[in-house]
């Protein structure tokens, strides 16, 4: 009997794109996960289209044997669940082989956090770099970087949302940014004055080119805008000049900083959820655990009785 697995995968990805607005990166991740699972199943004499529960357990077991973390195993199982849920809904299968497969237990790690002082050092360094630029091209690149950095810390955007901002992204007289996130859902986030000033400085230099391209940060790439990799590399370079460990700094860590600093300042968890574009508040709640750890550390270091032998537990 002919194996229709490849055709089913293409139909699934088409559905994810057309009906759920999945981003290109998301679709590529699904494709990689399903292709890898298909390879494991083929070696076992099975196919993706006709796999049973034991086959799926074997796929997850193979990941564990290859050293994949429980989080990676759980993500792979999630991709398979979505795929078989689609096949069932389309009448291509009468069952879901993932239904009785338990998800690998994973320890939810706390996100890396930059302190307010760390972020201030980054922002200060970005300004210094502009003043010390040796050429006009270098100055332009550094003005762009400062705008990206200010926008990211002021809004908590995902890096893919940041680099792909359309040229006409401002709303309400420039007081808000309109961000198109996962699933093409739009949200509005307020603009800080420093972020607006940095953005104005960038647009003053590149306005006509950006407007013509349709992107706030245009580039000669396939998609027409700056890549995530370029910004991430520039961020690590600035972090190093600011005296911060480059391994500690990434665009996603700045998104974490935005959320944790807001909560530390007394922001409502639901408001932070909306600003980050999280569908489920449980995703946002990880930042409350970060604050819990910091509060424990604060008490341990500064409370007069914290170091008393009877209070060490």
Image (cartoon, rainbow, N blue to C red):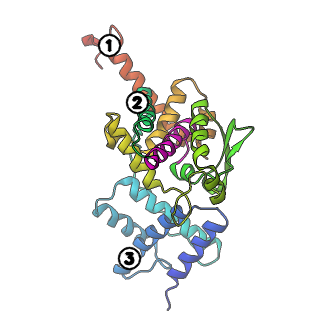
Residue 281 position within the rendered picture, expressed as x and y whole percent measured from the top left: 58, 40
Callout in the foreground (2, 1): 2
Of the numbered discs 3 and 2, the one sitting upstream in the chain is 3
Q: Is residue 102 visible?
A: no
The region drawn magenta spans 136-158
The residue under the point 31% across, 38% down is 245
Q: Which mark is residue 121?
A: 2
Total of numbered circles in the picture? 3
Q: Would you identify the image quadrant in which residue 267 lies?
A: top right
Specify whether 246 is left or right of 56: left
Q: Which mark is residue 306?
A: 1
Name the foreground residue: 21 vs 196: 196
Q: Position of residue 44 (x, y in %)?
A: 35, 79
For label 1, count other residues whose C-alpha is less than 10 Å away and answer few (under 14), some (14-19) or many (20+): some
CA–CA distance in space, label 2 to label 1 = 31 Å
Kindly identify which residue carries mark 3. 39
């Amino acid at each position: 009997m002919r194996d229709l697995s490849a055709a089913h995968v293409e139909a699934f990805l088409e559905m994810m794109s057309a009906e759920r607005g999945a981003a290109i990166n998301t679709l590529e991740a699904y494709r990689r996960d399903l292709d890898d699972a298909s390879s494991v199943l083929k070696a076992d004499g099975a196919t993706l289209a006709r796999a049973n529960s034991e086959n799926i357990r074997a796929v997850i077991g193979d990941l564990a044997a290859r050293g994949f973390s429980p989080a990676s195993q759980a993500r792979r199982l999630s991709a398979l669940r979505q795929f078989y849920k689609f096949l069932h809904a389309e009448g291509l299968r009468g069952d879901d082989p993932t239904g009785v497969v338990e998800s690998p237990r994973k320890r939810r790690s706390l996100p890396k956090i930059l302190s307010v002082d760390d972020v201030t050092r980054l922002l200060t360094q970005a300004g210094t770099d502009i003043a010390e630029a040796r050429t006009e091209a270098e100055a332009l690149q550094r003005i762009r970087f400062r705008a990206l950095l200010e926008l990211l810390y002021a809004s908590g955007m995902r890096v893919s949302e940041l680099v792909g901002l359309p040229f006409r992204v401002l709303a309400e007289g420039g007081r808000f940014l309109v961000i198109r996130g996962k699933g093409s859902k739009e949200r509005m986030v307020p603009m800080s004055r420093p972020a607006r000033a940095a953005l104005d400085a960038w647009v003053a230099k590149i306005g006509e080119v950006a407007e013509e391209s349709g992107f706030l940060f245009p580039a000669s790439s396939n998609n027409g805008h700056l890549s995530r990799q370029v910004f991430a590399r520039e961020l690590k370079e600035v972090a190093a000049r600011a005296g911060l460990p480059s391994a500690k700094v990434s665009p996603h860590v700045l998104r974490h900083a935005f959320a944790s600093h807001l909560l530390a300042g007394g922001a409502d968890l639901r408001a932070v959820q909306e600003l980050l574009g999280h569908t489920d508040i449980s995703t946002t709640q990880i930042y409350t655990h970060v604050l819990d750890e910091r509060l424990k550390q604060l008490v341990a270091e500064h409370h007069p009785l914290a170091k008393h032998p009877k209070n060490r537990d």
